[in-house]
């Protein structure tokens, strides 16, 4: 198992086969997946299959990867942080996505994971510009981006594709630049 980085309370690492129960716990919750493009999982096999696909991606030489967010204290996986889009021909622009178990929201875990992902990206010279987007109705996600030090750039009108709330929707765009990361 490769550990990407550690924070005060978290370990950001590759997904392991044994993590399927924790993934299913939050991916089956309609509240968690409300603004996401995948339907809530209806059986544990979906979680097992998703982890299998993520593990296969680790063997590819790409930054398009999903990582587990686990608690240092007990190893429980409470969410995922993903490098969703990497465009090396666009001068190193990268997009980050994330999801967190509802039981662990409001405790600063996602902000902690995101800020340290920025540091990891800078330290490894992966990108010069990092963007995050959220459905404008998903205010909590935007608050994470603000707390992580990202700059609000504006609204991309009807740029979002189908999620579990509606078809086309407005996306709020945030960014942070290489030189802004501590």
Image (spheres, rainbow, N blue to C red):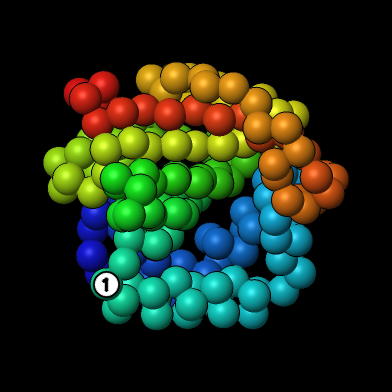
At x 17% / y 45%, what residue is drawn? 125
Q: Is residue 158 above or below residue 152?
A: below
* Nearer to the camera, 95 or 69: 95
At x 31% / y 76%, what residue is drawn? 60
Instruction: Assign the C terminus to one quadrant of the image.
Output: top left
Q: Position of residue 173 (x, y in %)?
A: 55, 30
Q: Position of residue 20 (x, y in %)?
A: 52, 70
* Nearer to the camera, 61 or 164: 61
| Corner quadrant of residue 171 | top right
At x 21% / y 25%, what residue is drawn? 179
Q: Is residue 17 above or below residue 119?
A: below
Mark 1, residues whose alpha carbon is within 10 Å: few (<14), some, or many (≥20)?
Answer: few
| Residue 127 horizontal side relative to residue 169, left or right | left
| Residue 64 horizontal side relative to residue 154, left or right | left
| Corner quadrant of residue 76 | bottom left
Instruction: Assign the N terminus to one quadrant of the image.
Output: bottom left
Q: Which residue is mark 1?
A: 61
Q: Is residue 15 above or below residue 55?
A: above
At x 73% / y 51%, what residue is drawn? 161
Q: Is residue 9 visible?
A: no
Q: Secondary structure at mark 1?
A: loop
* Nearer to the camera, 116 or 20: 116
Q: Position of residue 55 (x, y in %)?
A: 39, 75
Q: Position of residue 61 (x, y in %)?
A: 27, 72
| Residue 11 horizontal side relative to residue 106, left or right | left
């Amino acid at each position: 198992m490769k550990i990407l980085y550690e924070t005060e309370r978290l370990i950001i690492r590759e997904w392991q086969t044994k993590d399927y129960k924790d993934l299913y716990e939050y991916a089956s919750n309609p509240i968690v997946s409300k603004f996401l493009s995948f339907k809530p999982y209806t059986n544990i096999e979906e979680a097992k299959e998703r982890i299998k696909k993520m593990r296969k991606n680790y063997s590819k030489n790409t930054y398009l990867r999903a990582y587990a967010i686990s608690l240092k204290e007990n190893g429980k996986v409470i969410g995922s942080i993903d490098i969703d889009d990497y465009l090396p021909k666009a001068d190193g622009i990268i997009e980050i996505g994330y999801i967190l178990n509802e039981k662990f929201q409001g405790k600063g875990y996602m902000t902690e994971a995101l800020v340290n992902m920025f540091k990891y990206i800078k330290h490894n010279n992966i990108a010069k510009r990092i963007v995050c987007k959220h459905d404008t109705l998903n205010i909590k996600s935007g608050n994470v981006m603000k707390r992580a030090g990202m700059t609000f750039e504006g609204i991309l009108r009807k740029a979002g594709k189908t999620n579990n709330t509606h078809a086309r929707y407005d996306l709020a765009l945030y960014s942070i630049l290489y030189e802004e990361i501590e």
